[in-house]
Image: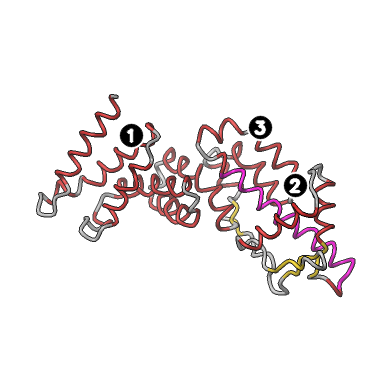
Amino acid sequence: DKLENAGNHLMSCFSAANRPQGDPDKRLATLRIVNSLFRIYFKLNTLRNCKYLIRVVDAKKFVAFPHFQAGDRVTYKFFVGRLAVFDENFDEANDHLSYAFDHCHPSHYTQRRLILKYLVPVKIFAKQSLPSDALLQKYDLAGWYSAIKEAVKTGSVGKFEEALREKMALFVQAGIFLLMEKLRVAVYRRLLKRVKLIHAEMRPEKAVQVPLRYFVGALQWQGYVTDLDEVECIVANLIYNGHVKGYISHKSGVVVLSKKEPFPAMKIY
């Protein structure tokens, strides 16, 4: 009740400060009020209320975003990025969270670490980008993401599942467990690439035509119970989401990969 009352009072303050003909100094306080409302709505789990505030901030009549103080802009982008994660708009989430991290002063270690907690999995999923070991160590996030990163690099489904189980409590508390589960596709992508490389050595004349049963075998070898139908769905999703370039020939039971960069390069930042 206290939080709801605080939210109602802040909304009244926001409306008063945001009058187009109002005091310019008061209008520059509006984004800070919005950020305070975001904190309340996140604690109350009433995230739908945030959408109205975002529409107001995006409106042409609102104060131009660069005019606000850097700290307020960073906080706003952080919350909007988290909302985009909940809505599964991962490209938007990457843009907002990257802005927040890039514009957060290097001396603000705690804030930058908090942003990275969300940005790291978003970048893996949306941009096929892995954090460097140095970055994870600098911000004390190796315990969160090193095992996940290693699983993605090696295509180890078993290591990924193990890391997910071990860190489940952390990921759930941070509100990113569902996002972390989605990173499984990055592991599949790497494993499929390894299968393709082995197949290319065995059958160079059909290097880009990879039998799906080989992928089934690779998953089963790692202890993952699966069949051809599920593997077709996995590969189809990889292609649909841009993680792999190619198409499935259902008649032949193969995935036909692009001859040019079938696996977009994984970047390190």
| Position of residue 170 in the picture relative to residue 1 (left or right) | right
> Answer yes or no: do the residues labelled 1 and 2 have beta carbons within 8 Å?
no
Badge 1: how crowded within 10 Å, few (<14), some, or many (20+)? some
Q: Which residue is mark 2?
A: 156
The secondary structure type at the circle numbered 3 is helix
Tag 1: residue type? Ile
Residue at 38% over, 40% down: 47
Separation of disc 2 and disc 3 at Cα?
A: 16 Å
Decide which of 68, 9 is in the foreground and name it. 9
Which quarter of the image is occupied by the C terminus? bottom right
Separation of disc 3 and disc 1 at Cα?
A: 30 Å
Which quarter of the image is occupied by the N terminus? top left
Tag 3: residue type? Glu
Q: Which residue is mark 1?
A: 40
Separation of disc 1 and disc 2 at Cα?
A: 40 Å
Closest to the camera, between mark 3 and mark 1, is: 1
Q: Quadrant of residue 50?
A: top left
Q: Which residues are magenta?
A: 179-204
Tag 2: residue type? Ser
